[in-house]
Amino acid sequence: MRRIRRAVRGDVPWQAFALEAWRRAKARAFLQLERIELARRREREARLAPEFRRLSDGALLEYFRARRAPASLPGIAVAPHAYARLFPREAKELIAAARRIAEEHRWPLLGFGSVQLEREVDWRRCPVSKASWPLLFHADVEWVRSDGADIRVLWELNRLGHLLKLACAWGVSLDQRWSEECWRQITGWRAANPMGYGPNWTCAMEVALRAVNLLAVFELLRRAPSMTLERLKMMLALFDEHGAYIRRNLEFSYLATSNHYLADLVGLLWLGTLLPELSAARDWRDLALRELPIELDKQILNDGADDESSTGYHRFVLEMLLYTLLLCRANRIDLGERFETKLRAMLAYVRAYLRPDGRAPLIGDTDGGQFLPFLDREADDHAYLLAIGAVAFDAPGLKLSDEAPGELFWTGGEEAVARFRSLPLSSPPASAAFPDAGVYIQRAQDRYLLFNATRTGLSGRGSHAHNDALSIEVSVCGRVFVRDPGSYVYGADLDARHVFRSTAFHSTVQVDDEEQNEIERRAPFAIGDQARPRLLRWEASPEADHLIAEHYGYCRLPHPVTHRRAVFFDKRKLFWLIEDALLGTGRHRFKIIFHFDAGLTVEPFDGAAVEARDHRRGSSLLVVPLDLRQAPAIESRWTSRHYGERRASQAAVWTHTATVPLLLSWALIPICAEADRRAAEELIARLHRDRFSVLMEENARDLPRVE
């Protein structure tokens, strides 16, 4: 029954289920044909268009060395050596990274840091878990295993993003060591990964991302002295195989499509645009141009958020679409006004949700994935995309600092860097609401609170959402104090995966130890859609912000409970008042959770309150219950900023058993310096005395408080 409920979850019409059943039956038949074809297949050359098939070997090589169109991204296509002049520090780091890759066989993978590999890389062996995958037909390969193996890490290795660093290093320095190492690894990869077999051909998105990275490598190296006819033919055959695989294994579904299908289409668009010499290029490009606008309308909400309830995947999709826009502009391909409008909205969403420290809150899943990773970025580093967007759309409001990121050069060339430096700096952002996304940001000076009322995404069929309804993230005094825990890992540790997306790991209220939405350890990418948060009120003014929302995840209990949360932000005194109304029937056990960032000391303060302290900065955040009298438990937690990385942290958990309806209140008071402490204590005394209620207009008079 659980499997059936998972299969039919979400707001999907029955016609879509019927179409999906038909599609899957057809896909199974085509899969069997593919299995037979690949079993008979021998290594073959690329399928070139007739006019290129007629060229001699020498003429074909000379053609690719000399061609000026189609155009790649400007920084790749024209004078990459200028990078060293414009970004001297980054260029030195790039050469150092190339040396580590080529000579020490070591490079970073996600949050695992620098990983050591053998000179002859085992492309089917995860360098972290040391688990290997067999060379089976791609549909027979097991993705999620119970032995600690993590195919996500293996896929990151096989996206070949590190080869982009080597190729860029050659473009900057013209050092043949870097180009030769690229060719050596690509040759080894192709020998170890025949088309359609093994873990690196199991997911069309991974094939697409690898293809785009290899296209950039090819563009950088095709004029290099190391480019031979043999290598040219190898690359063309490899690109033809990648495009053919993606086209045959598109990750489309009538129930829901996600970032995977977008990546499939983008991969086909890049292959079809940059390699018109392949006979299938026009079909790939036309399909992508036809489907991309449809998917943008489905997957990007009107207020700019990616519809997977994940800021991590928002970055990935934005990067993918933004770079694709730049490629199409370079080749005079009109993606339409709607495409650009969506991208502007996506950039505005990033600008709004970035904390004062310039980092992103990690709502929902994040796996740290990047599209064309010219520089390695941690999962919560999203600001560099704003600089690219500022130039792409001539939008000074997206310019956060005068320091241009290196990606700006590779995607736009010298001209983009010059245009960026001429733009004025943006003014500080104000409080903002994104009702389609379910994200609300309250801010003034360096005070920041993000309120999370997101649904599970993709019409209730999302796989990257967490049980974080009505949770908060709070940043004050220059650092984050209350934060979302992140994701840590996917398949490598199903217990940890389950915990990181659980209600207990988020700063919200848990009822009777139940989850807000149904989740199971054995189904790491399935989540129910019971909570369905709903906004009741949003008002923002120069003096204060008011927000009220509720969710219904606990209405499935024998005695149903609705959780309603209000947040009042006083912008004059710079503190927050939070009220939790528990509405329904029966007696219940409530846990009110505040999940703190790593690196803080969380200690009792004045009886029932807690103080989270950053001893290095000398700043604190007080969390003060205005109704409960007992001290909370200080519980051990984890916080992750990047895939595969986690740090010990703590949560303050107040447990209270009571009959509903019930109202509980909390004050969040920053102390940025010891001189602020007396004023904070006076504010606490006033709040205890005056009993101001945010929910008063929402019938708060009828809600009993704890006496």
Image: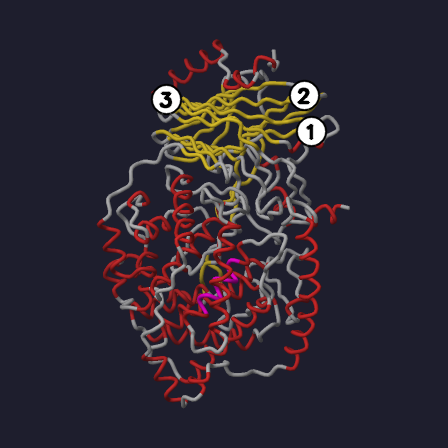
- The magenta region covers 262-271
Which numbered disc flags the more N-terminal residue, 3 or 2?
Answer: 3
Q: Mark 2 near mark 1, Cβ–Cβ under 8 Å?
A: no
Which numbered disc flags the more N-terminal residue, 2 or 1?
Answer: 1
Q: Residue furthest right?
A: 1
Residue 460 spot, x, y in % from top left: 62, 44
Q: Which residue is mark 3?
A: 543
Q: Which mark is residue 512?
A: 1
Which numbered disc flags the more N-terminal residue, 1 or 3?
Answer: 1
Identify whether 35 is placed above or below 539: below
What's the residue at 59%, 62% (across, down)?
Answer: 130
Residue 275: name its quadrant: bottom left
Q: Which mark is residue 657?
A: 2
Disc 3 marks a residue whose amino acid type is: Glu
Q: Foreground residue, 137 or 175? A: 137
**Neighbours of disc 3 within 10 Å: few (<14), some (14-19), many (20+):** few
Q: Is label 3 in a helix, a strand or a loop?
A: loop
Image mark count: 3
